């Protein structure tokens, strides 16, 4: 999916937990997420904490989308 | 550590007034066993049935398959940390009811897994079609939560297997086999010229119906560690694992791990089987990194020349497999990986979700996406109406005439990644 959409000229950010698989399949912008059963959330947190976590992930993904890359890049948490 | 397994060959299983093993036949007093199982207050009812080789019987959804064993000599009891106290097992003598198994079935969650056909084309793909099976159908009390339900069902299986095993405690085995693991230094002195080989046994640890337990510890909470192979033969590792049934290790697989048996077969002849490293397959990337770092560190620490790695499951665990492989290879240790494939129904897709050039010696248990037609069988033990919604089944899998079209994925043990099966493409 990531590669096919990029082939059409649209940049893609792959948000995923297992970064090595994303690297193997060839995604160019990768944002690491939380865990396989809950990539964009964390049931151990309160609703408020989870909202902050989600917002942070989405903002990081949007930032990645705007960033020029020359090769496969993983956008780690700063 | 040295263990003698005593095999008592079982040719039949029947219900009877007194539970006993006599002339290769297991007799089970249903009422007595029922009262033991129903001591668990989370279970409302239990029914027993029998499924024997060649019968027109389909068992589904299968949760676990367990071989009855009993400690005859030496410390501890079968399933330490679960049923027995956390004594270190794996030495002394253990009797095995060879040719028999306890099979647990039951509905726990929406997706239900695992088919064992006792005859027909499906029977070829599961080793459990060749066994005399005591099948248990347990129902929980109303309102019981899924994790407690799963636990009750899992323990019911251990208890029934231990009950049958106990019947064999005072029986002289038909055949015995001895397995011994020396300490690292003794082993080096005994076989100075032989290549030293360890086995990395990967355990699926991803949550409800995807878990494995070691001496009673949920293996997602372990750091990769060492275990004597004979401890595993005494039930130190048990399965809570049945989703995508084709490549999940039942408790029966752990007890009879063919990689361990084959390494013992070659031990002292072509290689020195040093021991077993167990590691997990968790859902967090940091856990995957830590566990594979640790298994490679242990392999290096043991100073082995080669390692065999067996995976459990597929998809994200392919990454754990590849991490183990490449990190161990990076230490200068040769590896062979055992896996299975999800290569699409025509077999032309990429087989694993992850890959690396160091994974250059691969053994496969087969393509789990392969489609198979299973004819209607006369009797179904369990619930057939789940076939449309199990992994490997699809809408329309269950036909009006009772036959089913499914991927191999649904058959318990069909593409086992310990290499348990005999089918080959050759």
Image (cartoon, coloured by chain):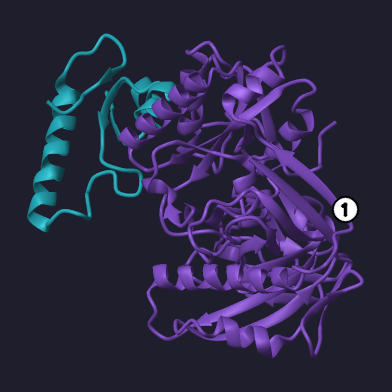
Considering depth in this image, is B116 or B11 the residue closer to the camera?
A: B11
Residue B35 in the image, given as x and y percentages of width and height: 60, 88
Q: Which residue is mark 1?
A: B175
- Number of residue marks: 1
**Left or right of B103, for residue B205:** left
**Left or right of B131, for residue B405:** left
User: Can see residue B419?
Assistant: no
- As drawn, the chain in purple is B
Image quadrant in which you'd find residue B402 = bottom right
**Left or right of B338, for residue B422:** right
- Output the chain of dot 1: B
Residue B169 in the image, given as x and y percentages of width and height: 74, 68
Q: Tell me if residue B229 comes above or below residue B216 in the rendering.
A: above
Q: Residues within 10 Å of mark 1 (few under 14, many from 20)?
A: few
- As drawn, the chain in cyan is A
Residue B95 in the image, given as x and y percentages of width and height: 75, 59
């Amino acid at each position: 999916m990531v590669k096919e959409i990029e082939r059409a000229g649209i940049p893609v950010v792959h948000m995923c937990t297992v970064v090595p698989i994303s690297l193997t399949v060839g995604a160019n912008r990768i944002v690491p997420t939380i865990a396989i059963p809950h990539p964009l959330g964390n049931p151990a947190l309160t609703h408020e904490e989870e909202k902050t976590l989600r917002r942070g992930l989405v903002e990081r993904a949007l930032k990645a989308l705007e960033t020029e890359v020359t090769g496969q890049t993983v956008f780690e948490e700063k | 550590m040295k263990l003698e397994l005593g095999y008592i060959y079982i040719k039949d299983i029947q219900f009877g007034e007194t539970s006993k093993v006599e002339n290769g036949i297991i007799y089970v007093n249903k009422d007595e066993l029922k009262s033991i199982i129903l001591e668990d207050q989370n279970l409302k009812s239990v029914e027993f049935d029998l499924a024997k080789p060649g019968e027109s019987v389909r068992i589904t959804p299968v949760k676990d398959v367990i071989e009855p064993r009993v400690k005859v000599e030496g410390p501890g009891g079968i399933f330490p940390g679960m049923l027995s106290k956390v004594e270190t097992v794996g030495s002394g003598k253990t009797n095995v009811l060879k040719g028999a198994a306890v099979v647990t079935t039951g509905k726990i969650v929406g997706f239900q897994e695992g088919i064992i056909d006792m005859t027909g084309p499906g029977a070829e793909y599961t080793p459990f079609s060749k066994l005399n099976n005591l099948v248990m159908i347990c129902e929980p009390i109303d309102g019981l939560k899924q994790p407690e339900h799963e636990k009750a069902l899992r323990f019911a299986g251990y208890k029934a297997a231990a009950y049958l095993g106990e019947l064999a405690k005072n029986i002289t085995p038909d055949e015995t086999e001895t397995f011994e693991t020396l300490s690292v230094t003794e082993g080096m002195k005994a076989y100075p010229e032989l290549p030293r080989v360890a086995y990395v046994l990967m355990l699926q640890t991803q949550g409800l119906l995807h878990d494995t337990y070691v001496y009673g510890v949920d293996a997602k909470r372990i750091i990769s560690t060492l275990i004597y192979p004979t401890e595993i033969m005494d039930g130190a590792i048990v399965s809570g694992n049945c989703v995508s049934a084709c490549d999940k290790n039942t408790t029966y697989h752990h007890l009879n791990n063919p990689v361990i048996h084959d390494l013992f077969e070659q031990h002292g002849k072509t290689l020195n089987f040093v021991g077993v490293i167990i590691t997990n397959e968790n859902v967090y990337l940091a856990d995957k990194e830590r566990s594979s770092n640790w298994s490679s560190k242990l392999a290096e620490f043991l100073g082995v020349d080669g390692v065999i790695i067996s995976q459990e499951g597929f998809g994200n665990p392919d990454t754990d497999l590849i991490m183990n492989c490449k990190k161990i290879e990076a230490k200068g240790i040769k590896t062979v990986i055992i896996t299975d494939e999800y290569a699409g129904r025509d077999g032309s897709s990429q087989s694993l979700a992850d890959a690396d050039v160091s994974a250059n010696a691969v053994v496969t248990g087969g393509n789990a996406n392969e489609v198979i037609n299973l004819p209607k069988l006369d009797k179904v033990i369990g619930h057939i109406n789940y076939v449309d919604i199990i992994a490997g089944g699809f809408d329309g899998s269950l036909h009006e005439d009772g036959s089913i079209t499914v991927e191999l994925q649904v058959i318990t043990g069909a593409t086992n990644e310990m290499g348990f099966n005999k089918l080959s493409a050759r």
